[in-house]
DNA sequence: GTCTATACCACGATAGAC
DNA sequence: GTCTATCGTGGTATAGAC
């Protein structure tokens, strides 16, 4: 019989977060119990409370970490000259980033309503910050005369929804690589905001 | 004190469904209890079981009823000549239908994973039937030489996601009417599949 | 058809031993 | 840091009176 006690704080913490991420993504926050997460990690339910004050904080921490990563990655991305090139950069960045971490993306869209109001406000502000980057590109392109977009706000919503939708059907190992998918989506996006 | 007993089967049934629809949309299926639904309706929890065998059947019945309505409405819609006109018809139908019943739409996308496998298969097949209507339009337009769509399957996913996204931001009484929204989206859709 | 009452179980979270 | 044990609450669903 294996020993059942010991000190593992440095590895158990990340394992709790990983298990929660996977289970929340699969079954939904409300449907997943702390006992389920503990079982996945291989500890008793009570031990989880060494790593999170409660279940809500665990969800918030996952979403918060994900949004931080998204914003950092976007701000580190190259910023080419010209709205068309910047739009292409956004499209390819968004598709690649989303397909690289489908579970975090899924939770970020599905579990917003399970955040307490204060936590929700934080995540929502981050999401708006990211989306406003796209709107700014569309405004610039409109000013440059490169795009024809009657309503940049609506267009940004429409494009974000289209791009994020990739995650609902894409499966790694399918007939298309991520690059091929990005090529096809970029073709549609480019034309959708073009003049004419 | 008002009487607390009596016979109301013809009105309580719909009220149970209405309350469940609203609460599931707001808090999520897993987070809503039968007691909550009963409170909303004004009966005791046990009384709900006169109208549904269990909570799962209640969710399935809502989704099933919604998908039936969607497919019937689409099949009753006019079917103009030419792929461009049919695509425009689809865009306007989809936006209007979705904005007319935001709660049912929301549940249909969010609660699929809370359906038991058998129930899920039924709803999924209906959803595929609806989405294949769009793909067929894109294929026809490609054959007619009216569209340039390298991958009709992907394009249909992209467009459905874009159009369905309207529900995440549209609020009745905002600065744009449903018709104006549909005009803007149709402009983007039309261009996104155009040649060039 | 709805009520009250309850069976039975699982939940989140905590206490104290090791 | 993890365990066992448990508290208090609330979950779905059912039984039987009215």
Image (spheres, coloured by chain):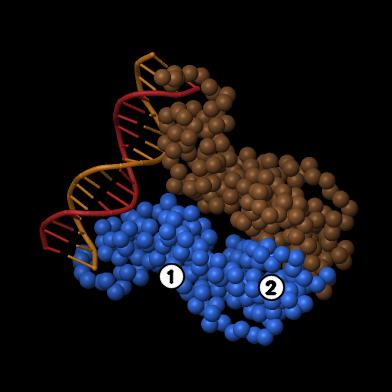
Chain colours: A blue, B brown, C red, D orange
Residue placed under numbered mark 2 in the picture: A139
Can residue B59 be seen by looking at this rendering?
no
Say which residue appears at 48% left-offset and 35% top-offset.
B40
Residue labelled with disc 1: A65
Q: Are marks 1 and 2 in contact (CB under 8 Å)?
A: no
Q: Is residue A73 above or below residue B16?
A: below
Among numbered discs 1 and 2, the one appearing first in the sequence: 1
Residue situated in front as seen by the camera: A49 or A134: A134
Q: Position of residue A173 (x, y in %)?
A: 58, 71
Q: Residue at 36% across / 57% down in the picture?
A: A55
* x 80%, y 52%: residue: B89
Percent across and percent down for residue A44 are 27, 58
Q: Nearer the viewer, mark 1 or mark 2?
A: 2
Q: Is residue B89 above or below residue A53?
A: above
In the displayed structure image, the side of residue A69 where residue A179 appears, left or right: right
Q: Within 10 angstroms of label 2, few (less than 14), some, or many (20 or more) residues?
A: many
Look at the numbered disc 1 and give the secondary structure of its residue: helix
Quarter of the image that includes the N terminus of chain B: top left
Residue at the (66%, 75%) spot, across then down: A137
Q: What is the spatial separation of the Cα atoms under label 1 and label 2, in whole angstroms? A: 29 Å
Q: Quadrant of the C terminus of chain B?
A: bottom right
Q: Is residue B35 visible?
A: yes
Percent of width and height locating residue B52 = 51, 33
Q: Nearer the viewer, residue A54 or B133?
A: A54
Chain name for mark 1 = A
């Amino acid at each position: 019989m294996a020993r059942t006690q010991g000190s593992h704080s440095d590895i158990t913490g990340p394992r709790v977060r990983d298990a929660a991420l996977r289970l929340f993504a699969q079954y939904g926050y409300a449907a997943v119990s702390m006992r389920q997460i503990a079982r996945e990690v291989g500890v008793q339910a009570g031990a989880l409370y060494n790593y999170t004050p409660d279940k809500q904080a665990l969800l918030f921490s996952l979403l918060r970490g994900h949004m931080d990563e998204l914003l950092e990655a976007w701000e580190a991305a190259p910023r080419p000259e010209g709205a068309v090139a910047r739009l292409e950069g956004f499209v390819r960045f968004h598709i690649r980033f989303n397909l690289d971490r489908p579970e975090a993306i899924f939770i970020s869209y599905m579990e917003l309503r399970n955040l307490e109001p204060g936590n929700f406000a934080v995540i929502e502000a981050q999401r708006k910050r990211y989306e406003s980057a796209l709107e700014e590109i569309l405004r610039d392109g409109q000013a440059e005369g490169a795009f024809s977009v009657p309503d940049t706000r609506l267009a940004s919503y429409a494009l974000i929804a289209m791009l994020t939708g990739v995650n609902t059907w894409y499966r790694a190992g399918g007939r298309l690589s991520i690059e091929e998918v990005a090529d096809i989506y970029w073709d549609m996006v480019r034309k959708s905001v073009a003049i004419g």
